[in-house]
Amino acid sequence: MKVRIDGVHKSFRKDKHQQLEVLRDVSIQIKDGEFVSLLGPSGCGKSTILNLVAGLDSPSEGSITVDGKQVNGPGTDRVVVFQQGGLFPWMSVVDNVKYGLRLKKISAKEVDERADDVLKMVHLSKFKGHFPNELSGGMQQRVAIARALIMDLEILLMDEPFAALDEQTRIIMHQELQEIWQKTGKTILFITHNIREALTLSDRVLLMSTRPGQIKKTFTVQAGRPRDPSDSVLVHIEKQVMKELEEEMEKVLKEELGDDYRFKTSAFRDRNRDHMGDHI
């Protein structure tokens, strides 16, 4: 198993006397080359799980292993792509992409070749000399993905990388990420609020409960690639996911508004039929 999360709990200290429990008894197994998405309500701990796998934080209880080795910090087998690309504004596209290789013992020729390869993969070869402020949001995220790919690490951890993009750009990025994943065979853990995004990209979608986050249900997506969101298989799974999410959303709203609150699911579905799952 490539990534194994066993019985993980995570709490953060709110103040001197209180702990905020974010994750409770989370167990996940991810196979080599698998694309897995975590989906759930805001605050359920999706990004916390990604940070734990990345080695940016430690679990309160439980264990996380990659290729059977305990994760005790960031490693040379994992790389993270965040929602904001974090590009250096004073560097060109190609220099941003090369940045991660600066301390590796690699010849300048090989660095240039690898940069050319990944820029071609994300369709930015013509923009290698441009600077971040000359690029659209989607192009900046392509640079961030290229910067991760050039490291040629086995596991790609993506924390809502397309959340800030408009719908049209997001659709294009979905197509490109699928192509990249199929070419490279990377193991991908992807965080999202968007149902359609998760179903379009993933082999499996893990639906999380409200805080403290647990894995509520696993959906296996058996559909061909590249995927069309209107595919009957995806539409069927989307309805199942939406039903489960509505239950979790009602829990959140009851906690905020009182136990007598009832979530109007039919009204929600009618209002969101064309954009089901966005921003949840």
Image: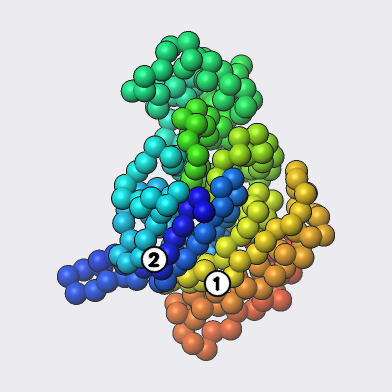
Q: Residues within 10 Å of mark 1 (few under 14, many from 20)?
A: some
- Quadrant of the image for the C terminus? bottom right
Q: Nearer the viewer, residue 1 or 200?
A: 1
Q: What secondary structure is found at the residue carrying circle 1? A: strand
- Tag 2, which secondary structure? strand
Tell me, yes or no, whether the two marked residues, 2 and 1, touch with CB atoms within 8 Å. Answer: no
**Rendering coords of residue 119 (x, y %):** 57, 23
Most extreme residue toward the top, as rendered?
A: 109
Residue that carries the numbered disc 1 in the rendered image: 216
**Left or right of 216 in this view: 267:** right
Q: Residue furthest right?
A: 232
Looking at the rendered structure, the kind of residue marked 2 is Val
Residue type marked 1? Lys
Estimate the spatial distance between the alpha carbons at disc 2 and disc 1, rounded to whole Å: 15 Å
Instruction: Kindly indicate the quadrant of the structure image that contains residue 98.
Output: top left
**What residue is shown at x 21% (from left), y 68% (from top)?**
15
Vertically, is 147 above or below 165? above
Residue 68 visible to the viewer? yes
Residue at the spot of label 2: 8
Picture coordinates of residue 100 (x, y %)?
40, 27
The quadrant where residue 199 appears? bottom right
Checking the image for residue 199, the label placed there is: none
